Amino acid sequence: MSSLWRQFMTYNRYSQIAARALRAGLKEDARVQAEKRGFTALRYQEWENGKGGEQIWVDKPQDDGRAKPAV
Amino acid sequence: MAFRLAVRALPRRAMPVLGRRGYAEAVGAADKIKLSLVLPYSTIFSSEEVTQVNLPAVTGDMGVLANHVATIEPLRPGVLEVIESVGQSKKWFVSSGLATVHPDNTMTINVIEGAPLEDFSAEAVRSNLAEAQRVAAGNGSEVEKVEAGIEVEVYEALQAALR
């Protein structure tokens, strides 16, 4: 019997959802630590002739004051 | 006229050590397998000798002893147990990952997310399971129901593990 999720998503997404569910089942203090691991941020920048282009966010970080400004 | 047949001596190929076929040998009690068990953010075991590892593989629960045949097993949400020596075992609940047993009596387990069983709250698991079951049986989109189904699988396995 093949899994249902294969039709809709990649293994990456499946594993992230399962990890999110696991973190939500933890006790209070362990959960607070673990929830931070669920946040991802991604940006990219194209370089040409030694010069960097604009940094483009793919996945912006949470705006809670703790995020570092873009360098 | 006597022909002398010169039998050309073929260069003898070195017999490969692994070429001998035989029956599987029973694992001795003292044989250990080297385990590396890692999470993305921390290393639990780093090439340490252990006696047995019990894995929740997608194909079913399996136990790995020393000199196990090489295999690659995706893991399902379940309990991973490491028996370092007789009587000393540790358990973690893992969400998913990949276990690879190498041919040279070592194994690597990459786990996406995991925690010891005592770090989980039965109450949180119960309420989250009910919520996920509600979404999975509800009338959202296919993708939402499948995602809820994944969470149901994790919580059901967690409930069984915590019992």
Image (spheres, coloured by chain):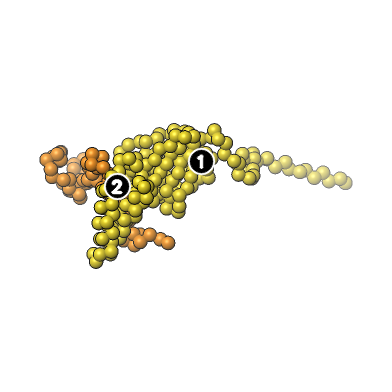
Chain colours: A orange, B yellow
A35 sits left or right of B154 in the view:
left
Using the image, determine if residue B32 lies above or below residue B24: above
Judging depth in this view, the residue of B93 and B64 nearest the camera is B93
Q: Could you say where residue B113 lies in the image, as x and y percent from the top left?
A: 32, 44
The residue where tag 1 is placed is B65
B65 sits left or right of B99 in the view:
right
Q: Chain of mark 1?
A: B
Tally the numbered discs.
2
Dot 1: element: loop
| Mark nearer the N terminus (2 vs 1) | 1
Q: Could you say where residue B55 lies in the image, as x and y percent from the top left?
A: 43, 46
Judging depth in this view, the residue of B142 and B92 nearest the camera is B92
Using the image, determine if residue B118 lies above or below residue A1: above
| Residues tagged by mark 2 and mark 1 found on one chain of the structure | yes
Amino acid type shown at disc 1: Leu
**Residue visible at 37% across and 42% down in the picture:** B92
**Quadrant hosting residue A34:** top left
Q: What crowding class fits label 1: few (fewer than 14 Cα within 10 Å), some (14-19), or many (20 or more)?
A: many
Task: Report the disc number at residue B122.
Answer: 2
Judging depth in this view, the residue of B38 and B12 nearest the camera is B38
**Residue visible at 63% across and 45% down in the picture:** B23
> Closer to us: mark 2 or mark 1?
2
Q: Chain of mark 2?
A: B
**Residue visible at 72% across and 41% down in the picture:** B9
Whether residue B64 can be seen here? yes
Task: Report the disc number at residue B101.
Answer: none
- Distance from the alpha carbon under mark 2 to that under mark 1: 32 Å
**Residue visible at 45% across and 49% down in the picture:** B61
